[in-house]
Image (spheres, grey):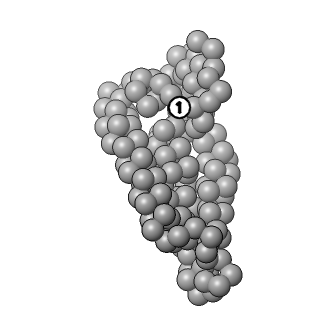
Amino acid sequence: MRKMTMFGIGPRMAVVSLSWALLTGLISYRWPGLFLVRAVPRTVCLVVGILLLVAAAIIWALSGPAMKKAFDGERLVTTGPFGVVRNPIYAGVIFLALPAVAVICRSWLMLTTVPLAYAAFKWLIRAENAYLAEKFGQDYRDYCARVNEVFPWPRRRR
């Protein structure tokens, strides 16, 4: 069995998504006339962005310690945020933190980081899923059957 760290695919996902976010941020800064969202007031963007970041931080605060405890104990965590989606930290980064930065910067180009990060997640998560299936067997397959990967809806039957 291939060894996986507690961070899973996170570092590789970060390289892809943060590189793209930085590139689109620099392009948006250099040519603001092309990429600036002017229809929404700056204050609204700032408040919405901060609220999204707070939501992402709450998800991380609830998920991170539970994941660390389960990883250290070599257990599968399936409760709390992990009972809603199998990958709450990745979901929080992709659908809350990355859009928050784009909204705060008022750059529609930076919003393209979200689908890119999701595509990277879908491609990279296969290795993490294979590792967990090998490590936890039927318990992990049952968990996958009842809890969605990153979207909390539609609810799967229990």
Q: Residue at x 38, y 37 (%)?
A: 63
* In the image, residue 91 above or below residue 13: above
In the image, farthest residue toward the bottom: 30
Q: Residue at x 58, y 12 (%)?
A: 158
Q: Which sits in the foreground, 7 or 79?
A: 79
| Mark 1 Cα shell of 10 Å, populated few (<14), some (14-19), many (≥20) | many
Look at the image and tell me whether residue 40 can be seen. Answer: yes
Residue that carries the numbered disc 1 in the rendered image:
85
Image location of residue 18, percent across then percent down = 53, 65
Which residue type carries mark 1?
Answer: Val
* In the image, residue 90 above or below residue 75: below
* In the image, residue 28 above or below residue 8: below
Q: Which sits in the foreground, 61 or 142?
A: 61
Image location of residue 51, percent across then percent down = 42, 53
Q: Secondary structure at mark 1?
A: loop
Q: Residue 24's image quarter?
A: bottom right
Look at the image and tell me whether residue 145 can be seen. Answer: no
* In the image, residue 123 above or below residue 2: below
Q: Which sits in the foreground, 76 or 58?
A: 58
